[in-house]
Structure formats: structure tokens, C-alpha cells
Image: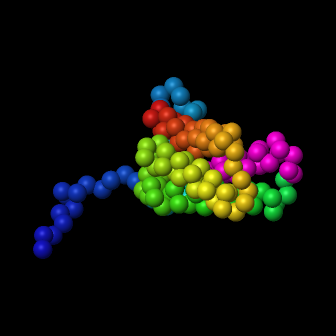
Amino acid sequence: MIARNQDFYPERKRLTVSQVTFERADWWRPQIVMLAGMRSARLAVLLDVCCVLVFVIIGRASHTKGEMLGGIASTAWPFLAGLALGWVLSRAWLRPFALLPAGVIVWLVTVALGMVLRVVSGQGTAVPFIVVALAFLGLFLLGWRLLAGRLARR
């Protein structure tokens, strides 16, 4: 067994969640510090769930079906199940902020399984609804990842 030489492996500086970096004249504008491990995955899941819920609430409001919690839940569950499967299939927890492949797989599986489960549960799907769901969820599920990636590169 080879002993680890402490001089050979210098100690690395570790960033914490509360640390923020600043650049020259932009001292007032904090840079995004990517959260490590499960914290970033939890944040990504929360953002994805919020995107799906915003889609459902706006859709229900535009069709005057009200905002009752039971109605929101019955409309949201197929898409939330699709979101969960998308996370598992893409293994998004490994790179939760990645646009490719995690974001695209999560988006497409969310819409596809959401539509299948809506049909199976008798909620129905129309072609315009599928197009709107693809567009809205694509904009939001991919949009926040794209924005996070741009801010992280600044």
C-alpha cells in the first residue's frame, strides 16, 4: 500500500454555499456559485416542479377552471410523474443544471409521459394542447438551465 504524501497533495480551497465571488469593477454583482452534490439536484428538482406547476396553473386559469387545489393536483400529476421519470432516465442528479442531455430528456419525457397519462386517466389531449405544452415546458424547463449556465460563465 502506498502512503499518501501530504506535500504531494496540496489542500484545495473548498467553496461553501454562502461564498460569492466578485470581479474587478463589478464588485456589486455576485457571480453564481454552483452548489455541490445533492443541494444542486434538490434546487433543480424544485425549479422543475415549479415550472410544471406554473404551466398547470396558467393553463387552468386561461380555461376558467379555477385554482382549487384538487383541480391543480389532478391536472399536474401526469406531468409531475413524467418529470420524475425524466429525471431517472436522464440521471439528471449527476448534472442537474446541464441543458444537454439532462434538460432536453427531462423536458421531452415530461411532456410525452404527461400526455400518455392524461389520455389513460381520461383527461384528454388535443394537438394544440400538446404543442402548447411542448413550447411552454420547453421554454421553462430548458430556459432556467440556459440562464443558469450563462450566469455561471460570467
Indicate the quadrant containing the N terminus: top left, top right, bottom left or bottom right: bottom left
Q: In the image, what residue occupies the spot 65% across and 48% down?
A: 51
Question: Dividing the picture into quarters, in which one does residue 63 lie?
Answer: top right
Q: Nearer the viewer, residue 60 or 129?
A: 129
How far across and down, in percent of the image, does residue 149 sit? Answer: 48, 39
Relative placement, left or right, of 81 versus 89 is right
Prevalent SS, magenta region: helix
Q: From this viewpoint, is residue 73 visible?
A: no
Q: In the image, what residue occupies the spot 52% across and 37% down?
A: 146
Coloring scheme of the render? rainbow
Residue 141 falls within the magenta-colored stretch = no
Relative placement, left or right, of 51 versus 62 is left
**Relative to 29, residue 108 above or below:** below
Residue 64 falls within the magenta-colored stretch = yes
Instruction: Name the residue furthest bottom.
Output: 1
How far across and down, in percent of the image, does residue 94 sit? Answer: 42, 56
Q: Nearer the viewer, residue 10 or 145?
A: 145
Instruction: Name the residue furthest top.
Output: 25
Magenta residues, as a range? 47-66
How far across and down, in percent of the image, does residue 134 sit? Answer: 60, 42
Question: Dividing the picture into quarters, in which one does residue 121 lie?
Answer: bottom right
Question: Dividing the picture into quarters, in which one does residue 133 lie?
Answer: top right
Numbered marks: total: 0
Q: In the image, what residue occupies the spot 66% across and 50% down?
A: 52
Q: Nearer the viewer, residue 133 or 128?
A: 128
Q: From this viewpoint, is residue 112 visible?
A: yes
